[in-house]
Amino acid sequence: MKIKYLLVVLLMLPLTLWANCIKVTSTSSLSAAALAAGYTASSWTGACDTCSGNLGLPSVISINSGTSFQPAGSLLASSVGSFLTSASNTAYSPNQILYRCAVADAGSLYEMYATNGDSAYAGMYASSEVSGAYYDVAKNVAVRMTNLTTGEYYSRYWKSRQFTADSWYSDGTYLYIPASAFSNVLYEMFKISSTSYYANGDNRYSDLWTQPRGILHLKARSGQVWQ
C-alpha cells in the first residue's frame, strides 16, 4: 500500500507575490550559520503518483471471506510510516532543509494533511464500520491513517498542525524547516463487510494502484500550499 507525503501527491499551486517561502534543493539556499549548525540540503522531487516510499507493511495480507474468523472491524495489518524514510523513493536526512521561509512567516506555517479525497478508492468514501477509515482498492478493505504528532485521523477534509519554533532553525533572517519537522503516520488496514466501493475483488490481488492514500503539505500564509 502506498501513502504519499510532502508534496508527494498534488502539483504545486501557482505561487503568489506575497509568498515568502522557497523549496530548498541546494546548500546555496542555506546561510553560513545554518551550515555551521549542521543543516544540509539536496535535490528532492516531491509530489508524483509513483514517488512513494515503503511503509513496511507485510508483503502478504490475508482476508477471510467469512465473518466469524475476521468479523468487520478486524485489523488486517498496520505499520508506522516514517516521514524520513517512507515519504518518497529517496529517504530524507533529519537535518535536510526542505523549505526556507522569511522570519515574518512565523505563526503562519502549517503542516496540512488529508486522505486523497478525489479518489474513490484512496480516501473519498468513509466507512461506517471503522471510525476514521476509508474504502480502499481491495474488496472488503478500509484504510485508516493517523497523524502521530496530533493523534488525529486523516480525513478527506484538510486538517492542520501549526509549526512552532521547535520545528525550525532560525538564523535571524530566515526560518529553515527540516525534514524532521514533519509528522509520521500510523497506517492501518481493516476488514469491512461493505462492498460499496472497491476496484479489485480478485481472490489474489497485487496492489499496483498508483494513487496515494494520504497527502502531507506545507502551508505558508493564508491559503498558500507548497509542494
Image (cartoon, rainbow, N blue to C red):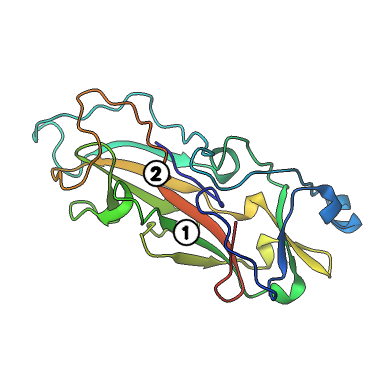
Is there any visible trace of residue 93 in the rendered image? yes
User: Which residue is tagged 1?
Assistant: 113
**How many callouts does the rendering have?**
2
Quadrant in which the C terminus is drawn: bottom right
Quadrant in which the N terminus is drawn: top left
- Label 1 neighbour load within 10 Å: few <14, some 14-19, many 20+: many
Q: Is residue 94 left or right of residue 205?
A: right
Where residue 181 sits: x, y (%)? 63, 55
Where residue 99 sits: x, y (%)? 70, 58
Q: Disc 2 marks which amino acid?
A: Tyr
- Label 2 neighbour load within 10 Å: few <14, some 14-19, many 20+: many
Is there any visible trace of residue 148 in the rendered image? no
Q: CA distance from mark 2 to mark 1?
A: 14 Å
User: Which residue is tagged 2?
Assistant: 187
Q: Nearer the viewer, residue 181 or 11?
A: 11
Q: Disc 1 marks which amino acid?
A: Tyr
Residue that extends furthest to the front in the rendered view of this protein: 14
Q: Give the label, 2 or 1, closer to the camera.
A: 1
Where residue 193 sits: x, y (%)? 13, 43
Upstream in the sequence, badge 2 or badge 1?
Answer: 1
**Residue shown at 54%/42% (left/top)?**
82
Q: Nearer the viewer, residue 151 or 119?
A: 119
Residue that extends furthest to the right in the rendered view of this protein: 32
Q: Is residue 227 left or right of residue 204?
A: right
SS category of the residue bearing label 2: strand
**Residue shown at 38%/27% (left/top)?**
58
Q: Which label is found at residue 1?
A: none
**Residue shown at 67%/63% (left/top)?**
166
